Image (cartoon, grey):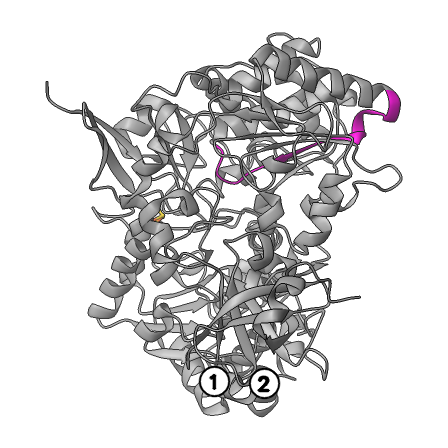
Amino acid sequence: MGARLTETHCPYCALQCGMKLSVDHRGVRVIPREFPTNRGALCQKGWTAADLLISHERLTSPLMRERRNEPLRPVSWEQALARIASAFVRIRERYGRDAIGIFGGGGLTNEKVYALGKFARAVLGTRNIDYNGRFCMSSAATAGMMALGLDRGLPFPLEDIPNAEVILLVGANPAETMPPIMQYFNEQQRRGGRLIVADPRTTATARAADLHLQLTPGSDAALANGLLHLVMAQGHLDHEFIATRTTGFEAVRRIAAAYWPERVERLTGVPARLLRKTAHMLGDCRYLMILTARGAEQQSRSVNNVLAFINLALALGKVGRKYCGWGCLTGQGNGQGGREHGQKADQLPGYRRLENPLDREHVARIWKMSPEQLPAPGRSAFELLDSIGTDNGLRALLVIGSNPVISAPDSGRIVRRLSSLDFLAVADIFLSETAELADVVLPVTQWAEEEGTMTNLEGRVIRRRQAIQPPAGARSDLQILAGLAALLGAPGVIADEPRAVFDELRRASAGGVADYAGITYERIDRQEGVFWPCPDKNHPGTPRVFLERFATADGRARFHPVEYEHPAEEPDDEYPLYLTTGRVTAHYQSGAQTRRVAALNASQPEPFVEIHPAIAHDLGIAPNELVRLATRRGAALMRARLTETLRMDTIFAPFHWGEAGCANLLTNPALDPLSRMPEFKVCAARLEKLTPAAVLPMVCSDDRS
Ligand code: SF4
């Protein structure tokens, strides 16, 4: 019998590359397929994704422990769900509804995200739900809403990228994080376009660029203001666009006037001559795109960073026009849909707001409850976790599709917080580092074993299709939420079948900012995905937004005056280096999945820190030596990789590993005042050479003691 082929998408990042899964008696095989995002290409994570389905580490039975110091033991589903329900009831009666929290993920399908938000508000009645996308996209989302009235990562499809004459990529390294997307940038350059990359590291993307601006970590807003100063001075402003399609330029102009090139060179480390050259390139072209990513967006002033680059694009009249615009490169697989349908602390489905009475009324009607029963907005992700053990803080937590022990900043503190919960339940496919701390662990189905929709970085809603049966013993997240709802006295409130949930999501999102009302599974199949907003079945979807008006009340984009502010922590005598964190090609997010794929693990098997050879020489550090890396939060052990791709004042550590090599033991939880994004990308650090005898005690040390 021939192989059975199923068209679906990669389980990892927001590019959501198209692939086929070929299933026969030999197992499951990945075959790349032509899809508008990846044009037949996959990165090594995509190629090896089928290994996730056969991992011997897969959880296939619920696990439970009676007391924290006991080991987890297999139990029946009935026992596991009953334990969760009884813990929730007990804690709700004793401490109130808000003592129970939900922590979701940016990789969950739209259906799961919707059901999770409804479960929190309509079943548990808690205001405390947030998700790991807060650590990923929240600053770009906030800035997009403030300036343009809409948060859709890219305002245009990827196919527009090759038409841009100039692209400025800020804090983005797609050549390593989503390699197939480079086809578009490569084509843009082949057609004569220019690619400019702003990044403290000479990444693979920076090496492919025509110009690299190697800025000081955390100086993004100064760079944007400096470029705005120069395009003003060089006469590149689009006065007609500013007058007819925007408001608020005057205040921005006054601020930019103080960012002359020599000052910006001091703030950013980018030579004034390169600033002038960049400004000419930005100002002289007809089609300009400015794309930001986590480098600029994961800082304690990252909404300002993004707003400053949007100001620049607006001043040049390069937003809301063909082959132009500001956009962000979303990271997680459903990072876009995951922030639209209700797992965010302040949000209802369709990007509706919990503070808005009309939004509350609409969603309450769909959920068959009164608007007064809907809770108020809750705590953001880090604040939610950090409230554990405090007065009025969380007492119980359900984590679905996330591994905050690895991905949250100051993770040593997060482990202590999670360990002090009265009750922790985790649903995952593997025993992640967070699941290891749980009282109850629920084994769930994964991408190729279930149906659902995802929304990729373009705002294109696509289908994830089931190719194989899940292992006996695993249940879908929807089944779990439906089962818990029934045990908590709300049978039927959560549907356990993806199509039924999606139909309800469509109604709940109708008329909202992220309107999915006209999107059906069948249309997604016919159209290779449907771009939101899509308000009815006859609407074609919206690949390009803002062409006629911005999504604000008066249709105009908003300038926002932004001053550069220093990062929350700067190098000093004690911690003399900038530490910046990020990803490598072989691993995805917390590594809970990719560290279990043999080929990926072989490619990048252990934590490492990149160090400039001159710094290593000063400290007597040899290549591949184990070094101690310390910040005011804690210390980590990593293998030294010497490279000249870094600035002399900066070291870089990927965050995919746990235990003593966890980079987030070091990162700073200083939060952006608007988006509540932690400062993953900048903190002050110290490197130390280790003697072999010192290694073990160092593993457990706390640098504050
Ligand atoms: Fe494509 Fe991202 Fe999957 Fe790589 S990880 S194959 S870039 S979707």
| Residue, disc 1 | 275
The residue at 52%/50% (across/down) is: 550
User: In terms of depth relative to the viewer, which is nearer, 180 or 696?
Assistant: 696
Which residues lie in the magenta part? 94-108
Q: Amino acid at mark 1?
A: Leu
The residue at 71%/82% (across/down) is: 572
Measure the alpha-carbon separation of dots 2 and 1.
9 Å
Considering only vertical position in the picture, is 242 above or below 136? below
| Residue, disc 2 | 264
Would you call the spot at circle 1 few (<14 residues within 10 Å), some (14-19), or many (20 or more)? Answer: many
Can residue 13 be seen in this snapshot?
no
Considering only vertical position in the picture, is 284 above or below 171? below
Image quadrant holding the N terminus, namely: top left
Q: Is residue 95 magenta?
A: yes
Q: x, y (%) of residue 149?
A: 58, 48
Would you call the spot at circle 2 few (<14 residues within 10 Å), some (14-19), or many (20 or more)? Answer: many
Q: Is residue 205 magenta?
A: no
Which of the labelled discs sits on residue 121, or is there none? Answer: none
Q: Earlier in the sequence, mark 2 or mark 1?
A: 2
Which of the 4 image quadrants contains residue 78?
top right
Considering only vertical position in the picture, is 265 above or below 401? below
- Dots 2, 1 in contact, CB < 8 A: yes
